[in-house]
Image (tube, rainbow, N blue to C red):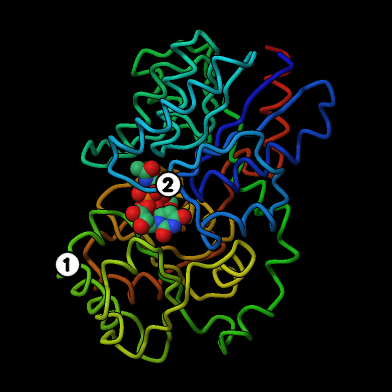
Amino acid sequence: MNKILICVGARPNLMKASSLFRASKFFPKLQMDLLHTGQHYSTEMDRVFFDQLRIPQPNYQLNVGSGTHAVQTADVMKKFETVLAKRKYQLVVVIGDINSTVACSLVAKKLNIKVAHVESGLRSFDMTMPEEINRKIVDQISDYLFTTEPSANKNLLREGVSKKQIFFVGNTMIDTLVQNLDRIRTKEFIRQHHLMADNYAVLTLHRPTNVDDRIHLMKMLGSIASNTPADQKIVFPIHPRTRKMLGNRIHRLPKKFTIVAAQPYFSFMSLVYHSKYVLTDSGGIQEETTFLKKPCFTLRENTERPITIEIGSNFLIGKNLKSIRKKLRTFNVQKVKKPKFWDGRTGYRILSLISKF
Ligand code: UD1
């Protein structure tokens, strides 16, 4: 294959696409174009990641923006079909589990274009999560499935995917972390926020089940504040969805919280790197903290990334915030090992496979 189209839509796709474009210099015969659906569009959620991670300008911009699931997915499909019908791509690469991923894969497949899925096979087994629905559909129709951890291979085989289509390659998000570690290690960002290394926590929250009910969200934040060590600040880079839900109540949050805007890649990862621990409902951050051997408390009832739990850096605590202090006391960094193929070379592995297909 030599003419491929990479599709991105929202923030977590961008770190992964960056790894593929960085690796593309080793494959000069491969023409790699980029399509952006525009699911995320604001500077803080999008533009700044293109600049920092040196992602090329998209060849196509669909500008779909926000909407309900049906509207967003349908808008991507309608606009993407017009693009794809006119151009000859041998392969469409979709990433992760967002609405743009499922929309682009459906359009490509129905135009008889091969589809590759990066970050395939992850399962939370929770069909109330929009991402789980997206993952299952994308994996059923993809031709090439690139996985990040052994559980994903097992899930795909159980769902009837042929072994020949599954490639355990590792984690493109970790590639980008490895590539930018020097920048992330600097303390300039934590100084800007008047923080001391190892003396604060980082919190992120954006899952609909956590943030879409204001009363639940306020209770959860109160409980986080009262169950984390008294002397530590909690830096809370706030996702636009969560910001919108909090409205004016943001001023009534406990003083422990240092609320900042959604951060660019370098400053966010640097905040995580120097923190004592992380509280999150994100998928990608569970992986990044595993690589950095940082305690991560996942504010969900399940995870589609069980390797992070097995390896010992991630604790699935759901609403059981009382367990944080104890787990912090007993956390043993020496026992945390990096998962196989989380080594900075996954983008290269993917492109070398693609160029042979
Ligand atoms: C989406 C993905 C989720 C991913 C997350 C990362 C789906 C189903 N969800 O959720 O898997 O973890 O991105 O952030 O695809 N908004 C802005 N600026 C933007 C984009 C959104 O302000 O650039 C606001 C809009 O008001 C929008 C809200 O954030 O209504 C939520 O955005 P949306 O794309 O619907 O979902 P996310 O919660 O970001």
Label 2 residue near ligand 1, CB within 8 Å: yes
Q: What residue type is disc 1 on?
A: His
Element on which disc 2 rests: loop
Measured as percent of width and height from the top left, residue 62 is found at 51, 37
| Residue under the point 46% across and 28% down | 79
Taking 54 as reference, is 345 above or below it? above
Is residue 150 in sight in this rendering? yes
Taking 2 as reference, is 323 above or below it? below
Sequence order check: which comes first, mark 1 or mark 2?
2
Task: Give the residue at the far left of this rendering.
Answer: 215
Q: Is residue 180 shown left or right of residue 285? A: right
Label 1 residue near ligand 1, CB within 8 Å: no
Q: Nearer the viewer, residue 348 or 239?
A: 239
Q: Pointer 2: residues within 10 angstroms few (<14), some, or many (20+)? A: some
Q: Quadrant of residue 345?
A: top right
Q: Is residue 186 shown left or right of residue 316? A: right
Task: Give the residue at the far top of this rendering.
Answer: 112
The residue under label 2 is 65
Taking 36 as reference, is 233 above or below it? below
**Residue 216: which disc?**
1
Measured as percent of width and height from the top left, residue 125 is found at 26, 35
Measured as percent of width and height from the top left, residue 262 is found at 48, 67
Measured as percent of width and height from the top left, residue 260 is found at 47, 77
